[in-house]
């Protein structure tokens, strides 16, 4: 998050001071982005995998502290709830075989973490939402006991001033109330980072926004929550509501802190950082002492720690990232992909989304006049609800736009675009063929992680729901242990 957080209560004066510091950070970034040559470099990739821990009964096991105490891997870290962990993959150049490198590292890391978990009768599962989760496992007592999470929960509570109400439609609609934000820990994601030059940021970001529904559709992996059959990617609805700071009876016009977006980027990444500063009140008013503006004027690269902390409390599904490392650079954090099922599945989904982002970026300015942003927003939630069966809208410039097309058909149509994008950033031919071939297999077989879960539940329809979900998790774990893609399960 950019700054060390060691407490969870703050004064109103600290909130006011943090707001001033945030505006100074934004001004410094604006100057920095105008610096010739800033952030220019080759494409590179990174990723973060969130995962859950389950016990012998296939239910959530709150032992992340025990596992971290046994690990000496600095890339393994805590997440919000005590049954969550996160692994941060090493950044790699995009040229060559970046996804193979990340897959190798991730496979090794998962094997190691699984062995550590076994010492406390646990197992690691990479899945969008753990199907066996129950209400009591999402209460405040299950939150990881670290100051940054207490500060986050306190900040949300300070703004919202009422309980968090979750309401999700689906085959079996769900309503539930929570006193804090711990329901967000039910969500585990695979977040992919793509470094881009500042002068290409707007086009790549807009292309990422346009194609996110396609990437989400083929990767959906969370159809069950607290025993209810909901969206194919229920995580999208749950995340938005679980950390919502708005008091709905009074502030319904204020923007949600988990937005798909507010419009197409016109010229520069600074627009997105400015939106974050102007549209969202500060959650955690921790500040530093650096004079960021003076440092930029003297030719230095600032940390912009307050801005980075603030960005970490606004969860755009595609998030702009400023990083002071390596002379400073910009990244697009592609946040919509769910965790799991296996490392090769994760790499295929990442390759598809990265390829679409770069491959479509060259046409994006031709397409956007034919596609108001609200259509992209519509597509995102339809893809979350029905994955590859969703009816989506898509821009066209040779007839009246938009046209209506199924997500599955559109994904097949866009595979060559993804291939061209991966080729542009230097990904080897055999790597492109291997990973996009797995996406093609999903589309041809109509098999996504979510559809596998639903088909399994049909096979145990005569079993009580809780037992059926337990069997689902066991079967998922057995299949994932083979490291084979979900299309071969």
Image: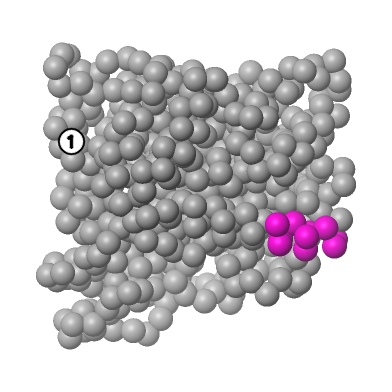
| x 37%, y 85%: residue | 289
Location of residue 265 in the rendering, given as x and y in whole percent from the top left corner: 22, 45
Residue 469, compared with residue 321, is above or below; it is: above
Residue 405, compared with residue 122, is above or below; it is: above
Pick the residue in front: 432 or 430: 430
Location of residue 442 in the rendering, given as x and y in whole percent from the top left corner: 52, 26
Quarter of the rendering containing residue 142 = bottom right
| x 29%, y 45%: residue | 423
Pick the residue in front: 435 or 42: 435
| x 81%, y 43%: residue | 59
Location of residue 187 in the rendering, given as x and y in whole percent from the top left corner: 60, 45
Q: Which residue is mark 1?
A: 363
Drawn side of residue 252 relative to residue 484, left or right: left
Drawn side of residue 463 relative to residue 339, left or right: right
Is 391 in the magenta?
Answer: no
Residue 378 appearing in the image: no
Q: What secondary structure is found at the residue carrying circle 1?
A: loop
Residue 458, compared with residue 318, is above or below; it is: above
Q: Which residues are magenta?
A: 111-120
State the residue lying farthest toward the front.
430
| x 68%, y 20%: residue | 455
Which quadrant holds the C terminus?
Answer: top right
Secondary structure of the magenta portion, mostly? helix
Drawn side of residue 32 relative to residue 315, left or right: left
Q: Residues within 10 Å of mark 1 (few under 14, many from 20)?
A: few
């Amino acid at each position: 998050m950019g700054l060390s957080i060691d407490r969870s209560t703050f004064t109103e004066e600290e909130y006011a001071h943090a707001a001033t510091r945030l505006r100074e950070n934004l001004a410094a970034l604006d100057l920095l982005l105008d610096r010739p040559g800033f952030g220019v470099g080759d494409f590179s990739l990174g990723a973060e995998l969130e995962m859950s821990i389950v016990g012998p009964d296939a239910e959530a096991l709150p032992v992340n502290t025990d596992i971290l105490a046994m690990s000496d891997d600095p890339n393994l870290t805590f997440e919000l709830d005590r049954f969550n962990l996160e692994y941060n993959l090493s950044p790699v150049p995009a040229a060559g075989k970046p996804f193979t490198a990340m897959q190798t590292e991730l496979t090794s890391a998962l094997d190691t973490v699984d062995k550590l978990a076994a010492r406390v009768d646990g197992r690691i599962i990479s899945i969008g939402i753990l199907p066996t989760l129950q209400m009591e496992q999402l209460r405040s007592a299950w939150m990881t006991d670290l100051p940054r999470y207490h500060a986050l929960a306190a900040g949300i509570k300070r703004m919202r001033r009422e309980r968090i109400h979750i309401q999700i439609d689906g085959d079996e609609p769900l309503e539930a109330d929570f006193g804090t934000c711990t329901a967000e820990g039910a969500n585990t994601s695979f977040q992919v980072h793509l470094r881009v030059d500042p002068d290409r940021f707007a086009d790549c970001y807009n292309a990422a926004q346009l194609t996110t529904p396609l990437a989400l559709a083929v990767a959906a992996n969370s159809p069950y929550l607290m025993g209810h059959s909901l969206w194919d990617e229920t995580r999208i609805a749950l995340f938005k509501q679980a950390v919502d700071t708005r008091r709905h009876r009074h502030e319904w016009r204020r923007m949600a802190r988990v937005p798909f977006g507010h419009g197409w980027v016109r010229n520069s990444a600074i627009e997105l950082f400015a939106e974050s500063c102007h549209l969202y009140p500060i959650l955690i008013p921790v500040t530093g002492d650096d004079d960021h503006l003076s440092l930029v004027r003297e030719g230095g690269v600032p940390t912009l720690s307050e801005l980075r902390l603030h960005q970490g409390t606004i969860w755009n599904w595609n998030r702009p990232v400023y990083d002071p490392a390596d002379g400073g650079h910009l990244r697009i954090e592609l946040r919509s992909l769910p965790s799991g099922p296996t490392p090769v599945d994760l790499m295929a989904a990442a390759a598809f989304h990265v390829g679409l982002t770069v491959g479509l970026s060259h046409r994006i300015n031709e397409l956007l006049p034919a596609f108001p942003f609200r259509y992209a927003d519509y597509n995102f939630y339809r893809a979350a609800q029905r994955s590859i069966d969703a009816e989506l809208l898509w821009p066209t410039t040779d007839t009246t736009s938009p046209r209506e097309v199924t997500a599955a058909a559109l994904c097949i149509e866009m595979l060559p675009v993804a291939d061209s994008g991966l080729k542009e950033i230097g990904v080897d031919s055999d790597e492109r063929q291997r990973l996009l071939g797995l996406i093609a297999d999903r589309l041809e077989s109509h098999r996504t992680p979510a559809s596998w879960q639903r088909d399994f539940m049909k096979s145990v329809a005569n079993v009580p729901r809780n037992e059926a979900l337990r069997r689902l998790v066991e079967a998922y774990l057995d299949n994932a242990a083979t490291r084979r893609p979900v299309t071969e399960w």
